[in-house]
Image (tube, rainbow, N blue to C red):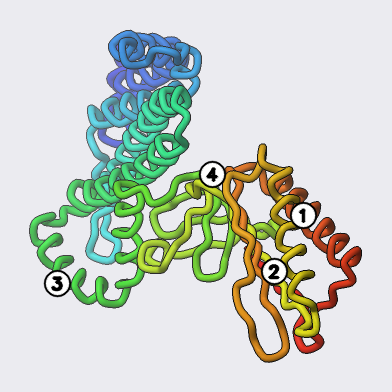
Amino acid sequence: MINRLFDLKVLDNTLGNYLLITGIILLAVSLKRFVSKYVAGMVFRLVKRIAQGVDKRSFVDLVVSPLDNFLIILVVLVALDKLTYPAILDIYIYKTSLHHVFDTIAVFVMVISFFWLLLRMIDFIALILEQKANLTQSQTDNQLVVFFKDFFKVILVIVGILMILKFGFSFKITSLITGLSLAGAAVALATRESIENLIASFIIFFDRPFSTGDLVKVQNITGTVEKIGLRSTRLRTTQKTYVTVPNKQMVDSIMDNLTLQTQRRAFIQLELDAVTPHETVRRLVEAIEELIEKKNDRIESHTVFLADIVKNAYIVTVEYFTATIPMSDFNELRQHINISIIEIMESMKIRLSAKESAKEGI
């Protein structure tokens, strides 16, 4: 009686086959976490040599979830493939059989689960490289890891789409690529700026005119580099705004890397009233010279001299350089020297030219 029940056919398959397939799927569901952790542990042991500094838990947390899904989908698809497709369901929808639709969906799900697992593996490899990059002082290595992680993820997504088209929709990839190459020329013209920015991103990483954390000035924008992406570079400006600059402009424009400067420069131009006696001008130059020399521990070099004589003024220039001290300390030093110069001029009763006031710059 039981054998007859198992041999009973429903939708072109025996009840026994249905029970067997169901049992296999339920067993796979119950054992999926154990199997995935075991497989993840085996893979971790294989890459343990290059994974120094990364604990097993970090690797398992990254790959167990996508590995669970991949194993379940694999078991379900293999098990269902052993069943005979019911003739009653052999219908067509827009000249496409329902059987082919199910096959396409199966391939689609299988490819997505497999490439999701590969993407997590890339995250794990990036985690290893990032920890190694943290051992160096330069931030370039860290940004390079982020850049290539995003780059290889894009490549994987493209390959995944091609596999779905190949195995799910039976597209001829060679013909597709040939057709895409022709269309790609037109798309390349339309997206020329994006392609130029992508190429510029490679130039930035290999030429290294700047790296993450550098203070740069480009096209009247001054800010700290926070991220270098495939298309653009993100800057945190001195006003704390977040500016996105296309990589092409970062490469083609005149870019000043302020972090790499070896000294900070201060420049003062005093335009004295032409009625100022020459002896007073001489004493002013000597007093400013003495003032700056008192700050010799912070000022590396300086010049103070009567630079020019014009119609209505005597022009005295003051220029000095410091080491690359913090900007707050540099501004404090400038302010002290500026106020001291004002005090000296007041004590000598020196007035600035009536037409123009003192000019100051950095």
| Disc nearest the viewer among 3 and 4 | 4
Of residue 97 and residue 103, the one placed in the foreground of this image is: 103
* C-alpha gap between disc 1 and disc 4: 31 Å
Quadrant housing residue 241: bottom right
Task: Name the residue that disc number 1 marks.
Answer: 337
Residue 290 visible to the viewer: yes
Indicate the position of residue 58 as horizontal and vertical percent values.
49, 18
Quarter of the image for the N terminus: give it: top left
Residue under the image location 31 percent in, 11 percent down: 49
Give, as a three-letter code, the residue at label 1.
Answer: Ile
> Circle 3 sits on which residue?
182
| Residue furthest front in the image | 279
Give the residue type at disc 3: Leu
Q: Amino acid at mark 4?
A: Gly
Residue identifier under label 4: 213
Distance (Cα) linking label 2 and label 4 = 29 Å
**Pointer 3 or 2: first along the chain:** 3
Neighbour class for label 1 at 10 Å: few (<14), some, many (≥20)? Answer: some
At horizontal 33% and vertical 21% (from top left) the residue drawn is 21
SS at mark 3 in the image: helix
Q: Who's the residue at 52% across and 53% down the image?
A: 258
Q: Choose top left, top right, bottom left or bottom right for residue 231.
A: bottom left
Secondary element at image label 2: strand
Q: Residues within 10 Å of mark 4 (few under 14, many from 20)?
A: some
Question: What is the count of numbered marks?
Answer: 4
Above or below residue 166? Residue 354 is below
The answer for how far apart the CA atoms under marks 2 and 1 are is 12 Å
Instruction: Say left or right for 67 vs 298.
Output: left
Question: Mark 1 vs mark 4: which is more N-terminal?
Answer: 4
Residue 117 vs residue 346: left or right? left
Q: Is residue 9 above or below residue 276?
A: above
Task: Give the number of the mark in front: 1 or 3.
Answer: 1
